[in-house]
Image (spheres, rainbow, N blue to C red):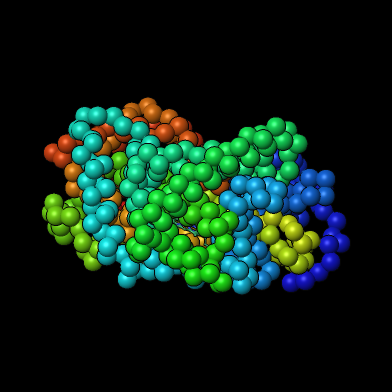
Amino acid sequence: MTGEEDVRPSLQTGGPGPITNGSLLDFPRDPLACMRKLYASHGPVAALEDEGRRVAFVFSPAYVQEVLTDIATYHSQFFAIRGSRNSAQRRLTSNILSQNGEEHKRVRRLVIGPFQKKCFEPYHDVLAKLAGDLLASWRPAETRNIFREMTRYMLRVTSVLLFGCDTDELAYEIGRHIERWVALNHAVGIGAFVPDAEAGASYDDLLATAASLEQKVLALIEHRRGAGATGNDVLSRLISAHDDSGAGMTDAELIGQTAVLFSAAHLTTANTLTWTLFLLAQHPRVASALVEELDAALGRAIPSLRQLEELPLLDAVIKESMRILPASAYSHRVNVRPVQFGDLRLAPGTPIIFSPVITHHLPELFPEPKAFCPERWRNFSPSPYAYFPFAAGPRMCIGAGLATMILKFTLTVILQHFRFTMVPGATIDARVDWTMLNPASGMPMRLLPLETGFAYAPVNGSVHDLVELGAAPEAELSRAA
Ligand code: HEM
């Protein structure tokens, strides 16, 4: 895998070599279009090159596996702009996503405890209460932006479950700040790794937002400290590790880890809930089959954690939703030594992108990739490097089990209380903002009473590039059967 950086780049866009010459800014401007074009031109490995600077892309399971498992070679790097020493920006970017080697192992060991299945039981009642509050605020015949609803719901869930804080306003404030801070990091560091001179104007704004976000995060930490920090929540564990002195966490680390956990947990899960509700609304036969499964197993009773694990169609619907519209559209690593993928040699320090949204749509791995087909998951276990909505390997998402539980619980109780349909003619854009595949223009849905069936409603927007909608009912029925 080693080699010197002595290979001349191909000069032809879409030529036989793996390199397209162009502007690196093409990637952050429209990551999805750029990656699709690169894949179409070059296949499993590609690079975008601009005046000698490269960003590389790996799309096939074998290359994804290499990048995700060889953690000594491929380092994780959080945002490019770290800020000066002693700045809020530096503290906020000092977190598990920017740590590697022994430092990463230590922090991962520290935070992973409450994310193990055996710790979930106390979360159940909290979740039942928060989901109950959400449903109580909805009325049949209302139109709601479900993306906004799910984001606010997940801010509360994250705040209470992970941080032992039930002050809604603080949760919403942190959510607003995180959104702005993440957006500014991407604007200033463009996609986190491509320098863009024009973006420099946002730098002061970034530092000010970081300072303000840090104050909110500190308020959350103080709130927990004030309550004794003895709970099973993640924050209590981080704080007591900190108080142990010696091997514990510095204040800077505590701030960085708290902020990253808050943002990693709520954005991704809210986004997945939204896309799954959308896919169900647009596939009435699948939605009805799922309701039948839930009715038979649960009726209107609040599901226990054990029951949630015994609902095969629910499990398949979530897997298929995260295949076709994965919340995390791409991530990247940076190689610390020269590496080679097929004909492509990369000098140390090259950003290397891997993308669930591209790999999950390769027809050789998932036939009819644009079809929402939960049925495909019956007796199907793709390689963890072909299907990786939570990434894979030693840095796989630590919240995958918890997120799956929250998704199952929340979708179940929503379906026990409401039917829903898309607002006809709504524009649903699947756009990559930062690294997230977002419903960029919102998700307007009409809530309906239980007596109403599900009904497909045509929508516009770029979501059609990824999902086939409005399939003949028979096709959908046979897929859902
Ligand atoms: C549907 C919901 C979720 C999705 C789709 C998701 C996705 C991901 C992905 C793709 C990564 C890998 C990023 C990379 O390697 O660059 C990741 C890492 C991570 N996720 Fe999640 N995540 C979800 C929920 C959560 C939750 C609920 C938490 C809880 C706090 C969480 C905490 C983390 C952490 C701490 C990491 C970094 C792990 C490490 O570097 O060792 N995530 N997640």
Nearer to us in this view, 382 or 449: 449
- In the rendered image, residue 203, in percent from the top left (x then y), is placed at 68, 37
Q: As drawn, is 108 to the left or to the right of 42?
A: left
- Location of residue 198 (image quadrant): top right
Q: Percent from the top left, x then y, of residue 215?
A: 51, 43
Q: Residue at x 36, y 50 (%)?
A: 165
User: Which image quadrant is residue 95 in?
Assistant: bottom right
Q: Is residue 44 left or right of residue 365?
A: right
Answer whether residue 423 is visible to the viewer in this image: yes
> In the image, is residue 316 above or below residue 1?
above
Q: Is residue 208 above or below residue 232?
A: above
Q: Is residue 233 at least partly visible in the picture?
A: no
Q: Quadrant of the N terminus?
A: bottom right
Question: Seen in the image, is 49 located left or right of residue 113?
Answer: right
Q: Position of residue 10 (x, y in %)?
A: 81, 52
**Which residue is pictured at 54% across the width and 39% down the height?**
212
Q: Residue furthest top?
A: 425
Is 424 placed left or right of 85 in the picture? Answer: left
Give the vertical position of 387 relative to 183 (above or below): below
Q: Which quarter of the rendered picture does the C terminus lie within? A: bottom left
| Residue found at x 23% / y 36% | 137
Q: Position of residue 333 (x, y in %)?
A: 64, 59
What residue sits 24% from the left and 43% below the top? 133
